[in-house]
Amino acid sequence: MALLNDQIQSEIEILKKAQAIDAELYKLLNLLEEIPVERARVKKELEAETGRLKELEEALKKRQLLQREKEGTLAQKEANVKKMEGQLSQVKTNKEYGALQQEIASLKADNSLLEEEILRLFDEVEACREEAAKEQARVKECEKVFQAKEQEVSQQEKEFQGHVQQLKTQKEQSVTQLSPETKQLYNRIVEKKNGIALATVSGEVCSGCQIRLRAQTINEVMIGKFLVLCDNCSRILYIQN
């Protein structure tokens, strides 16, 4: 059954007040949805730095292990050289003496290459250690940023949630005089349209979807015997006074 003109006008005014509350309410709800995303972003940055530090520490360990292995091999080869040099005085023929000297020279050449490789590994170990130390400092800084950001967003989340509850209470109070049917209609539209359930008739266009309205629709809004919805976006239409 159609309502009287003054009743429709009264409901429109109530809905406009509810709309103002819902616009702010849904803005806060959207901000609340962004908080977990921001948390995840900062956490991902921290995890990336932590992963980089782990990679550097693993690389450092591998080079240190390889360096120790090479040093052990060098020590063994040097011991063999000393042993062979000690055997030089015990050989009985020039041929044996020459062969032993040649073997010693070959070992010493190998040792020289090992020493160069150990020096290279030493430089790599130092470079890895310095880079790991820098990365460790970056991780600590990221941890500080993460903790500060976590405190910030947690405080925002708490404030937003408190404000959301206040707005929901205000909204419920603002629509108490609406008929159950109108309240149900409004709540259904506002939920689907992310907080914007009303739209003004701007010229011949719906301000909500920018679609040209039928002449009959505009006339129905102007007469105001019942609530009129936009044929395209289904928002409740009204004419701004």
Image (cartoon, helix red, strand yellow):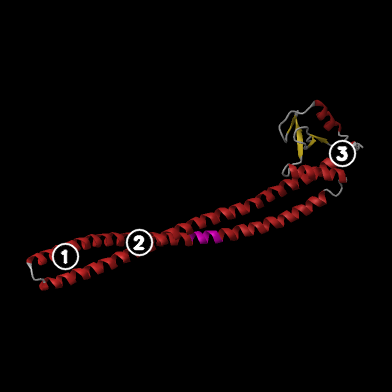
Residue type, label 1: Ile
Callout in the foreground (2, 3): 2
Label disc, if present, on residue 104 of the rendered structure: 1
Dominant SS in magenta: helix
Pick the quarter of the image with the N terminus.
top right
* Upstream in sequence: badge 2 or badge 1: 2
Label disc, if present, on residue 8 of the rendered structure: 3
Task: Tell me: 109 left or right of 67.
Answer: left
Query: Mark 2 sits on what residue?
Result: 63
Callout in the foreground (2, 1): 1
Q: Position of residue 48 (x, y in %)?
A: 49, 55
Give the residue drawn at x 10%, y 73%.
89
The foreground one among 103 and 124 is 103
* Upstream in sequence: badge 3 or badge 1: 3
Q: Is residue 142 magenta?
A: yes
Callout in the foreground (3, 1): 1
Give the residue drawn at x 73%, y 41%.
193
Q: Position of residue 184 (x, y in %)?
A: 83, 45
